[in-house]
Image (tube, helix red, strand yellow):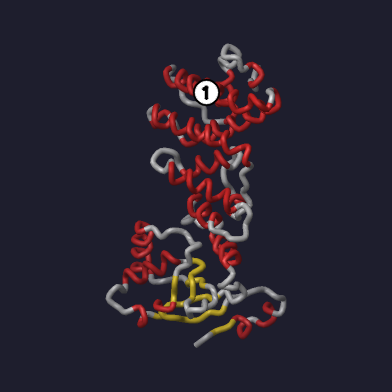
C-alpha cells in the first residue's frame, strides 16, 4: 500500500514542510546515480553483517522515477548493495524494499540532484573529502566545478603518499575543508594554483623523505596552514614578480628546518604557533627576517 505523509499529517503538510512518499519497490526498479560517491566493498561487507544481525532498520531515499522508470538512489546505496549481497540467490524483481521518494526533486535536473545528494550526506561518516570533491566536480551549472575537478586530479595523483584531507586543505587556502567545501562553494584563484602546487610537492617530499612516525597528520595540517600565512606575508612585502620564487626558496628553508627538528630528536610541533616558532628559528640567517612571526 502506498502511504503519503499528507494522509498522515495534513496540518504539518499545510505548513509546507516537505515529506517524502513512503512505499515499496523491487530492487530491479532501483538504480545508482553517477553523482553519488563510489561504493566501497569493505563498507558493504560491514553493513551486510549489521543487517544480518539486526534486520534492515532503515529506508532507502530515492528520487522520483526517471524517464526509464527507475528510482535513482539519493542515499543508502551501500545498504541496497548489502541487501543484494545477503539475498544474492533471490531475483531482484522479487525483492521488495522500503523507499522514501523525494517527490519535490526533479530527477532530470542534475544540479538539483547533486545538491540533494551532498546536503543529505553532510555530516555522514561514510562520505569523504574525495567523495565531495568528485561529486562537486561533476556539476554542470556550478562555476566552481572546474576547481573541484582540478583538486580531484591532485587527489588521484598523490593518492599513494598525501592524505586526501591534506591535499584539499592545501588548495582550500590552508583551511581544513568543511561545510563550505562540501556544499560546492570552494573556488581556486588561478594565481594561487602554482603556490598550492608547490606546497603539495613540498609536503609530498617531506612524507617520502622522513620517517612517517615523525610526520603526524596534525603537524602537516599546521604546516599547511602556516605556509599559506607565509604566502600572504610574501605578497605584502615583496614585488609581484618575486612572489613565487621567494616562496619556493622559503619552502627549501622550511625543508631544512624540518630536517633539523627531526635530527634534534625533539617532538614535531602540532600547533600553528609551534610550527611558526620552528620556522622562525633560523629565518633571519636565511634572509627571511621579514617573514618571521616571532622576534
- Indicate left or right for 47 with 190 as reference: left
Question: Looking at the image, which is closer to me, 286 or 117?
Answer: 286
- Indicate left or right for 84 with 167 as reference: left
Q: Measured from the top left, where is residue 258 in percent x and y?
A: 48, 23
Question: Looking at the image, which is closer to me, 45 or 62?
Answer: 62
Quadrant occupied by the C terminus:
top right
Residue placed at 72% from the left, 76% from the top? 15
Q: Residue furthest left?
A: 89
Where is 116 relative to 275, above or below? Answer: below
Residue placed at 34% from the left, 61% from the top? 45
- Indicate left or right for 276 with 44 as reference: right
How many numbered circles are shown?
1
Secondary structure at badge 1 equals helix
Q: Quadrant of residue 264?
A: top left
Where is 244 relative to 115, above or below? Answer: above
Where is 179 relative to 49, above or below? Answer: above
Q: Measured from the top left, where is residue 285 in percent x and y?
A: 58, 11
Residue ID for mark 1? 254
- Indicate left or right for 212 with 139 as reference: left
Q: Residue furthest top?
A: 285
Q: Measured from the top left, where is residue 210 in percent x and y?
A: 40, 27
Question: Looking at the image, which is closer to me, 154 or 16?
Answer: 154
Residue placed at 62% from the left, 74% from the top? 104
Q: Residue furthest front?
A: 241
Q: Measured from the top left, where is residue 13 in percent x and y?
A: 67, 78
Label 1, residues with CA under 10 Å away: few <14, some 14-19, many ≥20: many
Amino acid at each position: 500500500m502506498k502511504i503519503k505523509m499528507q494522509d498522515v499529517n495534513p496540518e504539518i503538510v499545510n505548513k509546507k514542510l516537505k515529506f517524502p512518499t513512503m512505499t515499496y519497490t523491487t530492487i530491479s526498479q532501483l538504480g545508482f546515480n553517477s553523482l553519488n560517491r563510489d561504493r566501497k566493498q569493505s563498507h558493504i561487507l560491514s553493513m551486510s553483517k549489521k543487517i544480518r544481525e539486526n534486520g534492515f532498520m532503515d529506508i532507502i531515499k530515492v528520487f522520483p522515477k526517471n524517464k526509464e522508470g527507475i528510482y535513482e538512489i539519493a542515499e543508502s546505496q551501500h545498504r541496497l548493495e548489502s541487501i543484494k549481497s545477503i539475498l544474492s540467490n533471490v531475483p531482484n524483481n522479487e525483492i521488495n524494499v522500503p523507499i522514501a521518494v523525494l517527490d519535490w526533486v526533479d530527477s532530470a535536473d542534475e544540479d538539483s540532484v547533486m545538491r540533494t545528494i551532498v546536503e543529505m550526506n553532510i555530516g555522514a561518516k561514510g562520505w569523504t573529502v574525495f567523495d565531495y570533491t568528485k561529486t562537486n566536480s561533476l556539476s554542470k551549472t556550478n562555476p566552481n566545478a572546474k576547481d573541484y575537478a582540478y583538486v580531484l586530479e591532485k587527489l588521484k595523483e598523490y593518492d599513494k603518499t598525501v592524505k586526501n584531507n591534506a591535499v584539499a586543505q592545501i588548495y582550500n587556502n590552508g583551511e581544513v575543508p568543511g561545510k563550505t567545501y562540501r556544499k560546492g562553494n570552494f573556488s581556486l584563484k588561478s594565481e594561487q594554483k602554482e603556490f598550492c602546487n608547490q606546497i603539495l610537492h613540498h609536503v609530498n617530499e617531506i612524507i617520502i623523505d622522513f620517517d612517517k612516525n615523525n610526520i603526524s597528520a596534525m603537524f602537516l595540517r599546521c604546516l599547511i596552514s602556516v605556509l599559506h600565512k607565509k604566502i600572504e606575508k610574501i605578497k605584502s612585502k615583496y614585488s609581484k614578480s618575486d612572489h613565487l620564487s621567494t616562496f619556493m626558496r622559503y619552502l627549501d628553508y622550511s625543508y631544512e628546518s624540518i630536517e633539523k627538528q627531526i635530527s634534534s630528536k625533539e617532538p614535531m610541533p602540532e600547533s600553528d604557533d609551534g610550527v611558526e616558532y620552528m620556522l622562525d628559528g633560523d629565518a633571519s640567517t636565511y634572509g627571511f627576517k621579514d617573514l618571521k612571526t616571532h622576534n
